[in-house]
Amino acid sequence: MLGLGRACSLGHSCRRPTATPPSPRPHPRSSSKSGRAVLAETAPSAQAQIMEPAKREEPRAVALRAVEATPESFAPFGQVIAASPDGDHFGPHDAQLDLSRGIPRFYIMRLESRPLKFSNITHHASVTQCLGSIGGQDWYLGVAKPSIVDGAPGQSAGRDPVQSRAGHYYLPPDPAEVCVFRVSGPKFLKLHAGTWHAGPLFKADAVDFYNLELSNTNVVDHTTHNFAKQDGVTFVIED
């Protein structure tokens, strides 16, 4: 409610000096519980209302059923690499890597508390990435097809291209095209450059993963889309 005066630096009520003739007709007054005079509404039907901030809608949870990652099912997103006999020659069943744009980094990544749900998804435009659990523990990865735009950007499928901090353009991933894979046993995934991925996720408390990317991938080539903020959805994995 409006007060008659303005607040002084000491917290007391200050009144402006009243002008000599003519004096304005005072407004009707009412008293607050604190004893300070306040202006009353001039219109009898109007009532003071406190405007509450609009409540932000909670993102809608979308359940996704995990499917087993096989060379055939995972082909649009990358490769599934399993053990091969010693002495086999290099061929299409091996990981087809592109590490040409920087210094390769191969390291063990310890992840903790990664439950089966996600709202962010990421891609790396300049490198293929390999991920696998040490010991062959089961894990999960949410994915969407690469959507990097080559050449002059233009609208596609009703979606406007976005420029990443790395400089390239991409189409935001469509929530309807997101799927989840389960990776079981001693195998690893090679992601195509630009494949959107969320994870690794797992049921255990902690899992160690080997990870092959570039030395600066997470610094200069890490583009993330937030489904909760941009699309109003989050994903929960069922398995």
Image (cartoon, grey):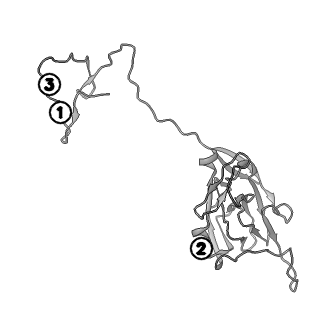
Q: CA distance from mark 3 to mark 2?
A: 69 Å
- Within 10 Å of disc 3 (Cα), the crowding (few <14, some 14-19, many 20+) is few
Q: Amino acid at mark 2?
A: Asn
Q: Secondary structure at mark 2?
A: loop
Q: Is residue 234 above or below residue 83?
A: above
Q: Position of residue 55 (x, y in %)?
A: 52, 37
Q: Is residue 75 above or below residue 174?
A: below
Q: Amino acid at mark 3?
A: Thr
- Please name which of the two marks, 3 or 1, marks the residue nearer to the observer: 3
The residue where tag 2 is placed is: 216
Q: Quadrant of residue 52?
A: top left
Q: Amino acid at mark 1?
A: Cys
Circle number at residue 14: 1
Q: Secondary structure at mark 3?
A: loop
Numbered-mark total: 3
Residue 87 in the figure: left or right of residue 103: right
Question: Considering only order in the chain, which callout, 1 or 2, is on the residue closer to the N terminus?
Answer: 1
Circle number at residue 109: none
The residue where tag 3 is placed is: 18
Q: Is residue 229 above or below residue 54?
A: below
- Within 10 Å of disc 2 (Cα), the crowding (few <14, some 14-19, many 20+) is few
Q: CA distance from mark 2 to mark 1?
A: 61 Å
Which of these two is toward me, 156 or 98?
156
What residue is shown at x 60% (from left), y 65% (from top)? 166
Residue 95 in the figure: left or right of residue 31: right
Q: Position of residue 27 (x, y in %)?
A: 25, 18
Residue 81 in the figure: left or right of residue 130: right
